[in-house]
Amino acid sequence: MDIRSRTLAVLNLVVACAVTTALVISAPGAPATGAGTGFLQSTMGTDAWWIAMVQISMEQLLKVHIPAAPAPYPGHGLQRRDKKTDEMLADLNQEFAKRLNVLMAVYQASGGDKRPSVVEPLGITEGDGGLRSSDKQHELYKECRRLKTGANGKPVGDGSKPEDWEEVPPTERVGDPTGQKLVPYAAPGVPAFGWTLQPTGGKKNCHLFEEVKVGNIIYEIVGPVTWTWDSWHNFGLAVDLAERIQVAGQKEPPRALPGDPKGGPGGGDAGRAWNNVYLAAEAFGMVLGARWDKDRDPGHFEWHPKLHHIKPAPGTSGKALGPDKVDAGYSWKIPQKIYEANSSGLTVASVSIGALRVFELVEDRGWIAVRGEHYLTGEKDKAWTGSWLTFDPPIRLFPAFIPTDQLSLSGDADPRWQGITTVTRVHYEFNAHPSAINYYKDQVRVSYSIVATVHDFLKEADAHDPAHHPSEAARYKRVWDHYVYAVYGRAGILADAKGQRQHRQVSGGCSFDDKGEAAYRRGDPLVWDLHLAWNRDTGAVGGWVGNVGSGNQPVYDIVPDVGKGDSVYGALPQGAWDIPTAPPLPTASPCRTPPPPPPSPPSPGLQP
């Protein structure tokens, strides 16, 4: 329900319950106006990495419960089949390493590859699958390539740049000089239409990935090892994952991806487990070599938020980038007040029905919490209604950091997202002609549950990999350099609660006091729906992350509009007015004759 509709519901209730009598008092102090607000900001550090949130994310995404840490795996605590335990994970950027551990936990919890042919389970490929020096990267790049030559047959460069090299043609590639290879066969003047087997001979010039035995013949699969002269491997932000399987007729168990059919039948669920690894990696905003349109690399994973280009070098090659060079998203900034206004009511003279709602925010142990909420309706200095609610302790509405691209929390069935708070509410009705005031105040302790969803567009952009997919570059260009969240949050009452209600009615130059019961009903909203688009780096806010593109090219960006004319701002919008704090109790002036019975204030569940 939009602000205007919600407010009409309240005003209809008030009109039905109240009879306004003439009064001769002046309005309270002029409503405050202003154009700005302060900011909350924090650098949470590694404490922001809540493994419980990671586990919830994986359960929601994959329907898999993962342990807090994976079992040892190659590259992290598990002894290789032919050497001592190696510890490649420690050489990586440690934020990347945390996420890599989650991928391995996902793989293991999803069943993994348990076939008898697996002689070494999934892990970081030994030697060059983790951190690499520049020299090692260049050495790998040169495999299956040769220096380009000019018309005179001499090299056109000295080999110090990638453009000095070209791939060795398939017919000239040699992986094992003692083996055999397939080469294209064609009749004179006829394009190649088949393959024939020839002795390899010559000198090894290509990486031998695998030997495939067909009958009594062993064929080679050879080719380039890498497609990049400089790599995120050089900065501890990329890994290659593989397992080793025993294949009949091969002395050396080759590297393979989980479920490779050459490993034969067996246990586990390798296909599902490996697909879950891909899905989890993309949820963390990783770049997958498996998604590249050209030169696919299915075992390759990268993570480098906000670092889109490897030139100029972001650090020292051969050394993992530290936390000061890779933004994991632990710092944030948000306005202390969020204003939701109905644009049709923003005039200099007045704010029409349903024009303004204000959320007052605080930080509470890594959460964005609401300590107060108020709304104003009607026309300034003429006839208006306001309600101010404060919460002690504040209501923790949504986490300031999420580890994956999406997270949903619901306290309706999960007690972790429930709480108890004391609500203090002041409801104020003012009419200038005829002059009248109704003032209500109550205080009730209530239990509540939250519903929150958070969507991180930067992680989504990274997973779509605009650097390798130009079609995605335009779509995400405005959210690729900042942590931009789309947030929805609300809090509802869990159980009926009652308290004392104070009321003072001022009318005809005198006042009347009474007391009654304030009832808070199960299911009623306590914090109204908050829709928020939030740039966590700059503190800019809006109503949603929407498409601002034209034609067939979508472009994502923060927009103020929530829908039905409601918009969200980080400062009081132009033309709107606000009373930040509740007016005081009107001065008592006892009446000689009691006024008509007082109206009942709207319940919290009928707030606009």
Image (tube, grey):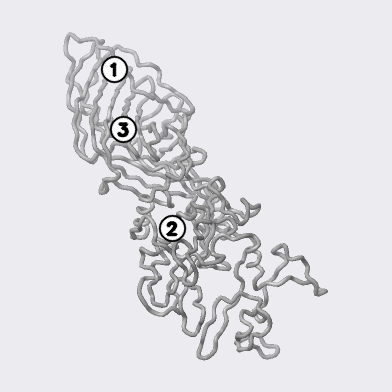
Ranked by sequence position, the earlier of labels 2 and 3 is 2
**Inter-mark Cα distance, 2 to 3:** 36 Å
Q: Position of residue 499 (x, y in %)?
A: 19, 28
Q: Residues within 10 Å of mark 1 (few under 14, many from 20)?
A: some
Which numbered disc, 3 or 1, marks the residue closer to the eye?
3
Task: Label 2: state its secondary structure.
Answer: helix
Is residue 299 depicted above or below 336 in this figure?
below
Q: Which residue is mark 3?
A: 393
Ranked by sequence position, the earlier of labels 1 and 2 is 2
Quarter where residue 432 is shown:
top left
Total tally of numbered discs in the picture: 3
Task: Label 1: state its secondary structure.
Answer: loop
- Residue type for callout 3: Pro
The answer to whether residue 228 is left or right of residue 59 is: right
**Inter-mark Cα distance, 1 to 2:** 59 Å
Is residue 22 depicted above or below 539 in this figure?
above
Labelled disc at residue 585: 1
- Residue type for callout 2: Asn
